[in-house]
Image: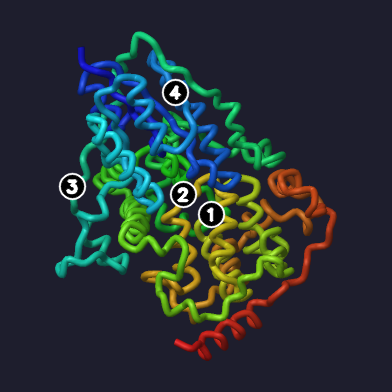
Amino acid sequence: MTSPTLVWIRRDLRLSDHAALTAAVERGGPVIPVFLRDELIDGLGAAPKWRLGLGIGHFAKALDAKGSRLILRSGDARAVIPALAQELGVGAVYWQRAYDPASVERDTDVKAALKEAGIEAKSFAGHLMFEPWTVETKQGDFYKVYTPFWKSVRDRSVEAPSAAPSSLPVPDVWPESEALDDWALGAAMNRGADVVRPFVQLGEQAAQSRLGAFMASKVADYDRTRDLPGVDGTSNLSENLALGEISPAQCWHAGQRAMQDGKSGAETFLKELVWREFAYHLMWHTPRILSDNWREEWAAFPWNEDERKAEVKAWKQGRTGIRFVDAALREMYVTGRMHNRGRMIVASYLTKHLMCHWKIGMQWFEDCLIDWDPASNAMGWQWSAGSGPDATPYFRVFNPVTQLDKFDKERRYVSRWIAEEYSTPHDDALAYFDAIPRSWAMSPKDAYPEPIVGPDDGRKRALSAYENRDF
């Protein structure tokens, strides 16, 4: 009989369009899915770690329904994966690729150890549509500007998604597994978990339903409604894409079909998928985007890096006195996600009006977002700050007041997320006070604050700093 195949599950919590799982079934022999909690998992922020735990549990049930199991182990992957492979007598270990530098280094070491032990080790595409090393300019360099990147890939063939395996061969005896509850992946969420949980759409089936509903009723107007935070006009698939509960290829082909059906917003949706690809493309070629200014000359810019400042605390608490900013930050605390227009306004206000380093915001999002994605989060913050590739110019300072008038004229968004100014606040606005740490000592009965930095004053300060920069 063919020896077993260990499938190392990571951010690919689905059965369909799962290249590593499909290859393991085609290889023959038992298939043993394994999820490993290593230092990279332990290092996640509160919200993404909690959401990952939910995803793991749901995926384990999906495997159970197939007559299979998800084996849980913890420790350093460099030691645990090769040791487990030896323990189980597997002939191959398959997984789908990650692209952040820490994961790449880890996976390279694991692959070398497995091959040294005579075990086949193979990684597969799946988290992206276009592998970063396959997209080049005519000069053989990588793209640093989005629009040429989009033009380069928009007509490329994306392999059609594969169906879930009809069955998964199982071993005669399953190896021991740790218990997911013992990992306590949601511990840091504290009371916020109960608030955010109703907004989670968990698992592969929910993701497919989301995609189907979006293509059926919302994609036609997507190029208009995606900028309106008070309207449910987006796909809301970010949390599912982040954990691989749906693949980008599945989304791409659905978007292509919508284009063929004449739905005008479908191309804009495809561009957003490629924006995500662009972020990974940049992270692969320039890993410093995760931790340092992509434009290295910005190291000299006089950003505040002290998180203890009162302005930073007010920003985190959604108490800046700027309604668009506060509504967006509160939306994130209640739902674990934030509308994209809100992300731009929130980031611009922190880095330009408040003159705070983009790292402060990036790390706060990393702790609070259930759809946290390393590449998109880093590129988004550096784009907003002006220090990144293809970034908004530093002198382009969003006015959060006029932006609100433009994109939330009827104040649907603000009234949903801010409680203090309303006699009968929206339930979601009140939920914010159930989610936040008690130490913040905030109440919906508090007076809404005056702006800590007004739009005009903040703009003048930002432009002054930009004009007097040393680079």
Question: Which is nearer the N-term, disc 2 or disc 3?
Answer: 3
Task: Give the residue pinned by disc 2.
Answer: 234
Q: Quadrant of residue 449?
A: bottom right
Relative to 17, 447 lies left or right? right
Image x and y of residue 313, in percent: 71, 63
Q: Nearer the viewer, mark 1 or mark 2?
A: 1
Cα–Cα gap, marks 2 and 4: 35 Å
> For numbered disc 3, what is the local secondary structure?
loop
Mark toward the start of the polypeptide (1 vs 3) = 3
Q: Residues within 10 Å of mark 3 (few under 14, many from 20)?
A: few
Residue in the picture at 38% in, 32% down: 81
Disc ID at residue 157: 3
Name, please, the residue furthest toward the front: 116
Q: Front-most of 471 and 268? A: 471
User: Which mark, residue 339?
Assistant: 1
Residue 128: percent from left, percent from top: 31, 47
Residue type at mark 3: give it. Answer: Ser
Going by the numbered disc 4, the residue's amino acid type is Ile
Compute the Cα span from label 4 to label 3. 35 Å
- Look at the image and tell me whether residue 293 can be seen: yes
Q: Nearer the viewer, residue 347 or 125?
A: 125
Q: Name the front one of labels 2 and 4.
A: 4
For the residue pair 443 and 119, the one nearer the viewer reads as 119
